[in-house]
Image (cartoon, rainbow, N blue to C red):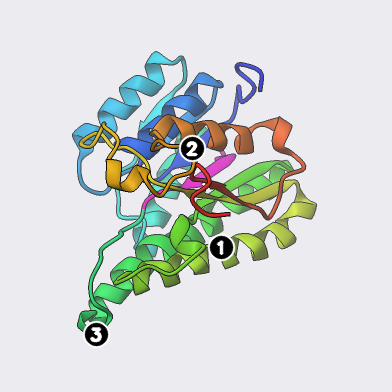
Amino acid sequence: MTERSLDGRTAFVSGSGRNIGRAVAVRLAQLGCNVVVNGSSSEDACRETARLVEAAGARALVAMGDVSRSDAMARIAETALAEFGTVDVVVNNAARRPHKPFLETSDADWHAVVDGALTASFSSARAFLPGMVEKGWGRVINFAGMKAIRGYFEGAPISAAKHGVWGLTKALSQEFGPKGVTVNAISPGQIRSETATQDDPARVATIPVGFMGTPGDIAAVVAFLASPEARFVNGQMLAVNGGETT
């Protein structure tokens, strides 16, 4: 990828107040992409991400809201489009990942998780794809996670939601690829966070490369998929997990 290869583009990154979302926002900014920073809880964290985006030489807009709600997503999109005209890159990072025994899972638990991952990806794509189609260029990058590859103990709602995200990715790639828009998914493995910055030996034992990933590892793959160089990558799920799944 060449530096500033996304000059003049704008990205929407959900859940970009911290961790992977923040790393993605900053990496895209380093490529010249303006960023709509989104979160649903900490506006201070989102504003810090926006500051880092601007320090990288791009414009930032903080658009708070719960992307699991279609009405909130519509308001976020309206704000973003009023500011930037179009959004060319959509990164659906936000999700809820609770673990709970299946027989203790309520309807509210189920809908909170499914709406947070699958419905949010649907709503953001619906909001921003028209502008991409009009320009004949766009990128939708969904986050599927290893839960879209295999089932997990006491994780039925998120496994179901993430498998749904993978299905949505494949369907949209076929419909919008001919219109100049690629749609792909990333499946991150075990990633360090702001609160857990050291490798967990028990978790590392399951990773063939022998270490946990960082948010920057995921951001690098997002940057590639968003770049012009990835024009022939469409309808794929890239597992970025050190070989934990093969």
- Which one is nearer the viewer's eye here, 49 or 151? 151
The single residue placed furthest to the bottom in the displayed view is: 103
Residue type of the residue flagged with mark 1 = Trp
**In the rendered view of the protein, which quadrant contains the N terminus?**
top right
**In the rendered view of the protein, which quadrant contains the C terminus?**
bottom right
- Which one is nearer the viewer's eye here, 58 or 98? 98
Label drawn at residue 166: 1
Element type where label 3 sits in the image: helix
Q: Earlier in the sequence, mark 3 or mark 1?
A: 3
Residue 88 is a magenta residue: yes
Q: Which residues are magenta?
A: 85-94
Q: Is residue 91 above or below residue 226?
A: below
Residue type of the residue flagged with mark 2 = Val
Element type where label 2 sits in the image: loop
Query: What residue appears at the point 42 percent right and 68 percent down from the top-left corner?
Result: 159
Mark 2 to mark 3 CA distance (whole Å): 36 Å
Query: What residue appears at the point 39 percent right and 18 percent down from the top-left corner?
Result: 54
The kind of secondary structure the magenta stretch mainly shows is loop
Q: Is residue 213 above or below residue 160?
A: above
The single residue placed furthest to the right in the displayed view is: 178
Label drawn at residue 209: 2
Within-10-Å neighbours for mark 2: few <14, some 14–19, many 20+: few
From the image, tell me which residue sits under label 3. 103
Mark 2 to mark 1 CA distance (whole Å): 25 Å
Within-10-Å neighbours for mark 1: few <14, some 14–19, many 20+: many
Whole-percent x, y for residue 223 in the image: 56, 32
Residue type of the residue flagged with mark 3 = Leu
